[in-house]
Structures are given as C-alpha cells and as structure tokens.
Amino acid sequence: MHTILKLISYLGLLLTVVPSVLVFLGKIELDFHKNLMLAGMIMWFLSAPFWLNTQNEQEAES
C-alpha cells in the first residue's frame, strides 16, 4: 500500500515541477500548466501524509 502511495506522491511532485519547465521552454500554454500543477498538488497532498511519517512512528514503537 505504501508503495502505491509513494508512487502517486512522486507523480504529483513531477506534475508540479515538469510543467514549469515546459512553459519556460514554450512547449505548453500557461492555462494547461496551471491545470497540471493543480492536479499534481492535489495528488501530493492527498497521498503523501499517509506514508511520510510512518518511518518515525515505527522507530518510536521499537
């Protein structure tokens, strides 16, 4: 389960970084850039909290 959440989180991060580079290079329009970044932000904030703190919790239990 954590592997899937990590994959979704990293894809969300890619959707926040790559569109900015593509706009800078003139490959995509600004409106499409905004939509991709919104999708990436939603993906990151909905998936990352479920796996980011699990390592600290496991260390505290042992």
Image (cartoon, helix red, strand yellow):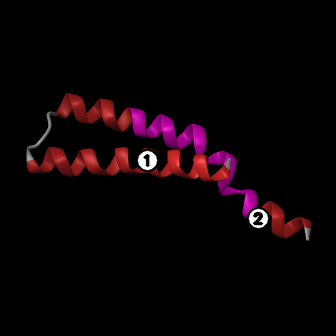
Going from N to C along the chain, the mark reached first, 2 or 1, is 1
The residue sitting at the left extreme is 26
- Give the x, y percent position of residue 60: 87, 67
- Alpha carbon distance from label 2 to label 1: 23 Å
Q: Secondary structure at mark 2?
A: helix
Magenta span: helix, strand or loop, mainly?
Answer: helix
Give the extent of the magenta segment: 39-55
Amino acid found under the numbered disc labelled 1:
Leu
Seen in the image, is 3 located left or right of residue 11? right
Side of 30 relative to 34 (left or right): left
- Give the image location of residue 59, x and y in percent: 82, 70
- Circle 2 Cα neighbour tier, 10 Å, few/some/many (<14 / 14–19 / ≥20): few
Q: Secondary structure at mark 1?
A: helix
- Report the residue at 14% width, 33% height from top: 29
Residue of label 1? 11
For badge 2, the amino acid type reads Asn
Q: Nearer the viewer, mark 2 or mark 1?
A: 1
**Which residue is painted at 76% across and 64% down in the image?**
56
Task: Name the quadrant of the C terminus.
Answer: bottom right
Based on the picture, tell me whether residue 22 belongs to the magenta stretch: no
| In magenta segment, residue 49 | yes
Q: Relative to 36, does residue 1 appear above or below in the rendering?
A: below
Label 1 neighbour load within 10 Å: few <14, some 14-19, many 20+: some
User: Which residue lies at the image location 58% right of the left edge and 37% below the top edge?
Assistant: 46
The residue tagged 2 is 56
Q: Are marks 2 and 1 in contact (CB under 8 Å)?
A: no
Q: Is residue 21 above or below residue 43?
A: below
> Residue 43, how many percent across, how many down?
50, 38
Question: Taking 42 as reference, is 54 above or below it?
Answer: below
